[in-house]
Amino acid sequence: MLSKSEEIQILTAAADSLGSGSYCGDWLREQIPFIECDIRSDFHPGIYASASIQDCARRCAEIRVKAIEERDKIISDARKEADQIRAQAVRFNELQREELKRTLKAILSRID
């Protein structure tokens, strides 16, 4: 029976021997740290690898959907607030015009 270190060495050597141009070489090299961690933790990497990838993909999709929903809510809230600000500006301008009219009428009435 091989030790954990020996298995990791064999796995690393296999990834190196496959090289970067192979179908599995780059992928295997990227997976070695995770597999090594599992081996040192007494987990069997093959049992959890595919489930973990599927779980990660599902979780990523969930996060993306939530992010899109939050983005849409932020945009919607910003549009509502912008509409309120515009409406307040219009009301303010109308009040300013009315005040200006009253002031002008008062001035004109003093001139006559």
Image (cartoon, rainbow, N blue to C red):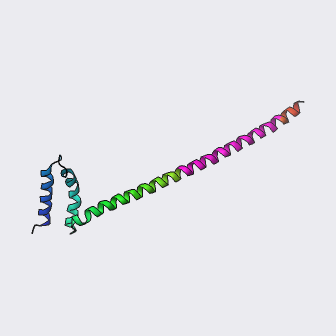
Q: Return the residue nearer the eye: 6 or 99.
A: 6
Q: Position of residue 35 (x, y in %)?
A: 21, 61
Q: Residue furthest left?
A: 1
- The answer to if 3 sits in the magenta stretch is no
Indicate left or right for 38 with 14 as reference: right
Side of 88 where 30 appears, left or right: left
Residue that sits furthest to the top in the current view = 112
Q: Position of residue 90 (x, y in %)?
A: 69, 42
Measuring from the top left, give residue 79's x and y in whole percent.
58, 47
Where the N terminus falls, by quadrant?
A: bottom left
Residue drawn at x 36%, y 60% as measured from the top left = 58
Displayed quadrant of residue 3: bottom left
- The quadrant in which residue 46 appears is bottom left
Residue at x-position 13% and y-position 55%: 14
As displayed, is residue 6 above or below residue 74?
A: below
Query: What is the residue that sits farthest to the right in this orientation?
Result: 112
Q: Within the magenta stretch, is there residue 77? A: yes
What residue do we see at 77% from left, 37% from top? 100
Q: Which contiguous range is marked in magenta?
A: 75-104
User: Which residue lies at the image location 45% right of the left edge and 54% below the top edge?
Assistant: 67
Q: How many marks?
A: 0
For the C terminus, give its image quadrant.
Answer: top right
Q: Is residue 112 left or right of residue 33?
A: right
Query: Dominant secondary structure of the magenta stretch?
Result: helix
Q: Where in the figure is residue 57, as x and y percent of width and height?
A: 34, 58
18 to the left or right of 104: left
